[in-house]
Amino acid sequence: MNIESADVIRLIEQFLKEHNLHSTLEALQTETGISLNTVDNTVSFKDDIVKGNWDAVLASVEQAHVPQAKRIDLYEQIITELADLRDISPARALLRQTEPMELMRSAQPDRYLRLEQLLSRTSFDSARSPQHTARNESRRLKIAEQLLAEVCTAPASRLLTLLGHSIKWQQLQGILSPNVPYDLFFGRAQMIAPAEDKAPCKLLTTIKFPKKQCPNSLAFSPDGAYLATGSADGFIELWNPTTGKIADELKYQADGALMMMEDAVTALAFSDNGEMICSGAKDGKLKVWRSKTGSCAKRFPAAHSQGVTCLAFSRDHSQILSGGHDNVLRIHGLKSAKMLKELRGHSASVTSAIFSEDMANIISTSDDGSVRIWDTSTTNCIHTVVPDSDKHGLSAPATHSALAIPGSPSEFVVCTKSPSIYILAMDGSVRKSITVDK
């Protein structure tokens, strides 16, 4: 498919028009000889002509390059109607100070003189007669047909929409990473200077909550642009993590229409593309939200019999993994809004659960002190590891989180309620332990 250069210029002209860059638009149209010739809405444009809303009509015609002959007809009709209404001053201004009328005076002096004589008359009796009104309506319809043949309408923001579709397609094809900033001008991912790896030592900002609105859960969006918090009163809010202020660029939050659960929010998770948020509550319910609009996409009213403790989206955003105080893990389908699979084996509350990078396995931790590795397809537990068993025997401390290791799909980190953390492999072996001295 060949892309015409004229189409590209029109896309740029539309962008300039939508951003009120009228001088630049005029210069581009003049230099290229390519006119945009669009109106926001052809139906409204015709309606304005038929009803005689001439201010709106003239504004649209001035931005569109309409042939001079049709502009002359339009201006002549407006001047005639103003004369009928004895609104002489604006009629004379249009006749003597506009380009179409100057062209009429040069090319058609007799026609121009008739308009001058019309404005010089001291009375005009037929302005409100039915025949005169009918003639005006007929002329307006004819002018509307002529002008509509010259203009068209186009979907808004076409340039930005097409660029967005192009980037989205490249992300879907694996050409671009969805989580890496992209330099649109140079056509490449932005180069990010490697940062020194060191422990945080500076407080960036503080988010303060009312006493009865203490946060129970939080999650960062994949791009780090938002921090989601879930509170004891059931509200879910998105914050700017740099300023510590509510993200009021999201219209629903600016309007006070916050996402909300019926009970305390105990778990939150973003999808990998940041478009969805899943929230779990103390009453065992799950909801999935659209982060940009705040609308609820799916509800799971009986996800767990007790409170939800952890959540994770699958990489393709089609499933949600949840764990709860009922000691059970469940996989829920976003399309069906039903539970798909159940994983039982822990003897205490599930504290965290994640999918492996290839989705073949699930890793879970629990207050029972174990780490379990499950086969996603069969839901069988294929490995059970108690990291601290050699030190603590049967009273091993709870394992409270499992984290994937970027760039190492066969390994993950497990934290326990002890001074030690562990790097485990998918085969259940402990690759490394790190202990912090007290």
Image: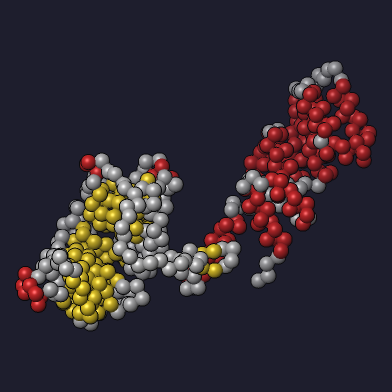
The image shows a total of numbered marks equal to 0
Display coloring: secondary structure
Q: Residue at x 80, y 31 (%)?
A: 94
- Left or right: 431 with respect to 291? left
Q: Can residue 296 be seen in this view?
A: no
Q: In which quarter of the image is the C terminus?
A: bottom left
Q: Nearer the viewer, residue 283 or 33?
A: 33
365 vs 246: above or below: below
* Image position of 400 with respect to 257: above or below: below
Foreground of the two, 42 or 154? 154
Q: Which residue is drawn at 43% across and 68% down?
A: 194
Depth check, front residue: 134 or 244: 244
Q: Residue 394 in the image: x percent, y percent?
A: 5, 72
Task: Name the image quarter holding the N terminus.
Answer: bottom right
Q: In this view, does 368 lie above or below 382?
A: above
**Residue 133 % position (x, y):** 75, 28
Q: Which residue is drawn at 63% across and 52% down?
A: 15
The answer to whether any part of residue 271 appears in the image is: yes
Q: In this view, does 192 lie above or below 241?
A: below
Residue 284 placed where, x, y %? Answer: 20, 56
Residue 338 shown left or right of residue 63 in the figure: left
Q: Nearer the viewer, residue 344 or 372?
A: 372
Picture quarter containing residue 314?
Answer: bottom left
Identify the residue shown where x is 76% and y is 40%.
Answer: 143
